[in-house]
Image (tube, helix red, strand yellow):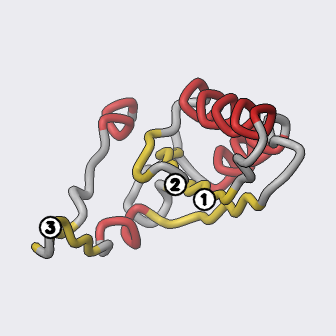
Amino acid sequence: MTWLSSYRIMWIMVMFDLPVTEPEERKAATDFRNDLLDLGFEMTQFSIYLRCCSGREQCETYTRRVQNTLPPGGKVYIHFLTDKQYQQIIRFENRKRHAASGKSDQYDLF
């Protein structure tokens, strides 16, 4: 049995900047966003998606899956965070400071 802790559980963050000048570029960007949702990612911002994973190996699996759906243009970055690091995120909404929720609906899968 794998021991899950806030140091083992990982978050995979996909950030991207895709061209959307031409209709086919907009379609490719929309298709990519939908592919991320189909892979179980949550939209955090329009070009930032997060997914909770049980460990580094699962993050690598999802990295390969994202790679298989990449559109032809633009930039895509993938970052890994431990759950402990994720819990330390501070966000501002309407100028008010909020701590990260520390929990996602995806977290319930574990």
| Mark pair 3, 2: CA separation | 19 Å
Query: Closer to the N terminus: mark 1 or mark 2?
Result: 1
- What is the quadrant of residue 31 in the picture? top right
Q: Which mark is residue 33?
A: none
- Foreground of the two, 98 or 3: 98
Q: Amino acid at mark 1?
A: Met
Q: Nearer the viewer, mark 3 or mark 2?
A: 3
Q: Is residue 82 left or right of residue 97?
A: right
Question: Which residue lies under the disc numbered 1?
Answer: 15
Q: Which mark is residue 48?
A: 2
What x and y, as percent, mark residue 16? 65, 57
Q: Look at the numbered disc 3 and give the secondary structure of its residue.
A: loop
The 10 Å Cα crowd at callout 2, few under 14, some 14 to 19, many 20 or more, is: some
Q: Amino acid at mark 3?
A: Asn
Query: Closer to the N terminus: mark 3 or mark 2?
Result: 2
Q: Is residue 36 left or right of residue 71?
A: left
The 10 Å Cα crowd at callout 3, few under 14, some 14 to 19, many 20 or more, is: few
Q: Do callouts 1 and 3 mark residues in contact (Cβ within 8 Å)? A: no
- Foreground of the two, 94 or 109: 94
Q: Quadrant of the C terminus?
A: top left
Q: Do callouts 1 and 2 mark residues in contact (Cβ within 8 Å)? A: yes
- What is the quadrant of residue 94 in the picture? bottom left
- Foreground of the two, 25 or 100: 25
Q: Nearer the viewer, mark 1 or mark 3?
A: 3
